Image (spheres, rainbow, N blue to C red):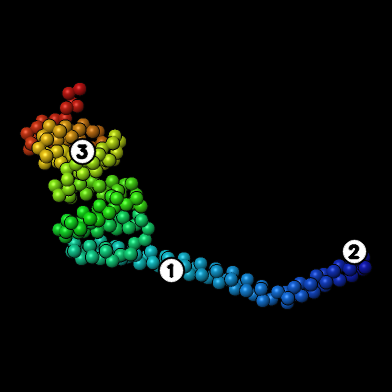
Amino acid sequence: MSNSDSFLEEVTEEVRRDRMIQFLRRNALWIGLALVVIIGGAVFFEWRKSAAEAAAQARGNALWAALEMEDATARAEALAAVEMTGSEGLAFLNMQRAAALLAAEDRAGAVALLEQIAASPDSTAALRDVARLKLVSLAGDTMPEQERLDILAQLLVDGHGLRGAALEQRALCRLMAGDMAAAEADLQAVLIDARTPDVAKQRVSQLLGVLGFDAAPAAQDG
């Protein structure tokens, strides 16, 4: 590179430097504000993240402490004080509260919570179905028979994970209504379902025996 080329390059670089300095001086305020916004936004984001993590940890600790309480009434009160966020979290919390209220012999309170979960479109389908099954079981004859049957019908579709338990509950409904033949048919259906757990089959067999029915499933004939 010749001396003239080197000189021109140095002059060009100096001009660029001067222009940059002039630009920074003219826009120093806006550049400063932009830096404040960027840095402040990053700090605020980290603060919110830390605050959310701390709040989640606090909720988890409060929930665990409540569930560890042996006294059912105190457990239900402690669970009611937990501020759970999100529809699924709230539905889970209410399921635990319903169990605590039932243990505390507050059936009406438990039923009210289960009705809320079963009717909420924000609850997961699994939680709604479990709530429906528990609702029918707890409500008993305080709920009209047809209403109980309508609720159970949603769980009796082929392949549903709670079909066997729903059949048991429908059999009990029919027994209470005096329809012995229909109750036996439901109980036999539980026995022949390959997905029915052994403990449930044993329970149903015992119930059939108490009622004077044949405890051997009809499907064994074929």
Q: Quadrant of the C terminus?
A: top left
Q: Work out whether mark 2 precedes mark 3 in sequence or the reverse, and give the earlier one.
A: 2
Q: Percent from the top left, x then y, of residue 91? A: 31, 55
Q: Is residue 75 left or right of residue 83?
A: left
Q: Which residue is mark 2?
A: 1
| Location of residue 175 (image quadrant) | top left
Q: Amino acid at mark 1?
A: Ala
Q: Amino acid at mark 3?
A: Leu
Q: Amino acid at mark 2?
A: Met
221 or 183: which is nearer to us? Answer: 183
Q: Is residue 191 visible?
A: no
Q: Is residue 22 above or below residue 210?
A: below
Q: Is residue 219 above or below residue 69?
A: above
Q: Secondary structure at mark 3?
A: helix
Which residue corresponds to the image point at 38% horizontal and 64% vertical from the top-left? 56
| Location of residue 25 (image quadrant) | bottom right
Q: Which residue is mark 3?
A: 167
Circle nearer the viewer, 2 or 3? 3
